[in-house]
């Protein structure tokens, strides 16, 4: 079996997921035990466990959940992240997505606390599939309602903010998900700073379309198949 990152054994996939969780902290997009990551593995979802510090997390603690079952059933010694519902919903409804990352980075979360979407203030917004980054309405963490709201905000997008909560990004694999997470927090920080001096001048639909065309196949935008 090969997973979203081309790995052929589950132990490697579990190790890669743990490494990605730790990378969130080193890259400055998460802190403490907040945040979670999931990875598509065949017809199952591997997801980080609940409330385990990343420096203590081991591959065998990663929970495994069937994608065809939405009851919350899991295998493993540790409970899956409380946010398993939106991870599960995204992987089930978006076959192109191989990894989902959720975190509480400072600037994304500050904008989410203000329930403010990110408009077309920088050309890098096209990396996320649209002309803006939507902010999903508020719902209590871990609920089916939050999962539904996140899925709606992600329609046609690779990222969204969650009101008074944080952010979610979707990648083809763990590497792209981490890259998108860093890019989203960078964009949020730039937007926040621009608001301090009167706000950004937004790019036009034509300018965004030109950028989107030039980005085709660029870098980690779309991982090339071997």
Image (tube, helix red, strand yellow):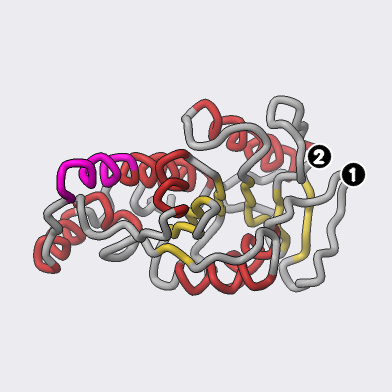
Q: Which residue is mark 2?
A: 61
- Position of 116 with respect to 16 (left or right) is left
Say if 41 sits above or below 62 in the image: below
Please report the residue visible at 49 percent of the width from the left and 36 percent of the height from the top.
Answer: 29
Residue toward you, 211 or 111: 111
| Dominant secondary-structure state across the stretch colored magenta | helix
Please report the residue visible at 76 percent of the width from the left and 40 percent of the height from the top.
Answer: 51
Please report the residue visible at 25 percent of the width from the left and 39 percent of the height from the top.
Answer: 193
Queried whether the magenta region covers residue 191, the answer comes back as: yes
Please report the residue visible at 31 percent of the width from the left and 45 percent of the height from the top.
Answer: 187
Q: Residue furthest right?
A: 77
- Position of 23 with respect to 41 (left or right) is left
Q: Quadrant of residue 66?
A: bottom right
Q: Quadrant of residue 9?
A: top right
Q: Position of residue 226 (x, y in %)?
A: 43, 50
Q: Earlier in the sequence, mark 2 or mark 1?
A: 2
Q: Which mark is residue 157?
A: none
Residue toward you, 163 or 77: 163
- SS under mark 2: helix
Q: Position of residue 2 (x, y in %)?
A: 64, 52
Q: Which residue range is magenta in the image?
A: 189-199
Q: Which residue is mark 1?
A: 77
Queried whether the magenta region covers residue 66, the answer comes back as: no
Q: CB of mark 2 within 8 Å of CB of mark 1? A: yes
Locate the N terminus by quadrant: bottom right
Q: Position of residue 64 (x, y in %)?
A: 78, 53
Q: Position of residue 176 (x, y in %)?
A: 45, 46
Residue toward you, 8 or 69: 69
Say if 209 sits above or below 197 in the image: below
**How many residues crowd around disc 1 within 10 Å: few (fewer than 14), some, or many (20 or more)?**
few
**How many residues crowd around disc 2 within 10 Å: few (fewer than 14), some, or many (20 or more)?**
many
- SS under mark 1: loop
């Amino acid at each position: 079996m090969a997973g979203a990152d081309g790995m052929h054994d589950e132990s490697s996939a579990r190790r890669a997921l743990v490494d990605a969780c730790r990378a969130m902290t080193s890259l400055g997009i998460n802190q403490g035990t907040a945040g979670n990551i999931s990875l598509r593995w065949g017809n199952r979802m591997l997801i980080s466990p609940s409330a385990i510090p990343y420096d203590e997390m081991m591959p065998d603690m990663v929970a495994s959940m069937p994608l065809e079952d939405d009851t919350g059933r899991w295998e493993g010694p540790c409970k899956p992240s409380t946010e398993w519902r939106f991870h599960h919903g995204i992987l089930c409804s978006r076959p192109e997505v191989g990894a989902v990352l959720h975190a509480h980075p400072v600037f994304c979360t500050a904008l989410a606390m203000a329930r403010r979407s990110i408009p077309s203030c920088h050309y890098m917004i096209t990396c996320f599939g649209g002309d803006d980054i939507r902010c999903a309405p508020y719902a209590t963490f871990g609920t089916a309602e939050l999962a539904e709201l996140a899925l709606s905000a992600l329609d046609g997008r690779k990222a969204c903010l969650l009101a008074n909560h944080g952010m979610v990004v979707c990648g083809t694999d763990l590497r792209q998900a981490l890259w998108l997470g860093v890019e989203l927090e960078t964009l949020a920080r730039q937007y926040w700073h621009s608001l301090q001096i009167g706000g950004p001048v937004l790019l036009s639909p034509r300018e965004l379309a030109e950028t989107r065309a030039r980005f085709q196949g660029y870098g980690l935008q779309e991982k090339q198949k071997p």
